[in-house]
Image: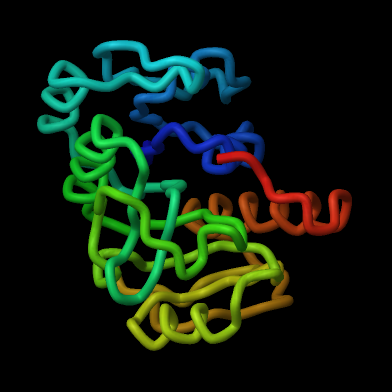
Amino acid sequence: KMTIYMNTSTTAMHVMDYLKETPVTVVTNNLRMSEQEMHPSSTIILSGGEIHFPKAALIGELAADSLRHINANICIMGCSGINAQVGITTGDFRESKVNQLMVQNSHGLVIVVADYRKIGVTSNFQVAGIQKIDILITDTYGDPARLKEIEEAGVTVMPGVKVDSLIVEGEKIVGVRAGEDELRSHVVVAADGVNSFIAQQAGIRAKEPMKH
């Protein structure tokens, strides 16, 4: 059963809407995940720690300590900013420490979900350098120059295009196939699910940014 790290991002949490038929273990500091509809064989592991409102984020040393002992296959993470120079950043120091551990202890793919407001932005506290990120899933409104910089730094950028499968060798993405009708891996289910959600929201709300 695949283990997924997921932080407190609302957008990241919507991945689970597309994994209802897949048994997974989700490790998160997002207290709201306890209300998420899941596969009967799925498991949610909450980090514990102090509750930071209004996001219902679990933070502090207790939260961080629990994550030090868990290795995940995939990390799905929202952020306050992402750019090629600094990587992914957040505005909350307490959450940044937990997010750092999620990235560090994810031994498969690190997937970042961010709307156009976050592209090219640097917030106060670094979570991970750009070299730690495998995939960026975003909407169609991001600055093309900034997205190109991120892509040139080695990140697979998916700006609002529905993707049917990734070409993965070991833990490295070597390409993308679009439009093929084939059995999709858990990684692609997660990426495609978030991507479909972003595309849907972009169509319904035009340029109204999604909440993080």
Asked if 161 appears above or below 108 in the picture, the reply is below
Q: For residue 105, what is the image quadrant? A: top left
- Position of residue 64 in the picture relative to residue 26 (left or right): left
Q: How many marks?
A: 0
Q: Residue at x 35, y 76 (%)?
A: 84
Q: For residue 130, what is the image quadrant? A: bottom left
In the rendered image, residue 88, in percent from the top left (x then y), is placed at: 34, 58
- Position of residue 106 in the picture relative to residue 183 (left or right): left
Front residue (pair 91, 74): 91
Front residue (pair 10, 33): 10
Q: For residue 149, what is the image quadrant? A: bottom left
In the rendered image, residue 87, in percent from the top left (x then y), is placed at: 31, 65
In the rendered image, residue 47, in percent from the top left (x then y), is placed at: 27, 20
Q: Quadrant of the C terminus?
A: top right
Q: Residue at x 30, y 33 (%)?
A: 95
Front residue (pair 118, 132): 118
Q: Residue furthest right?
A: 204
Q: Is residue 124 among what the camera can see? A: yes
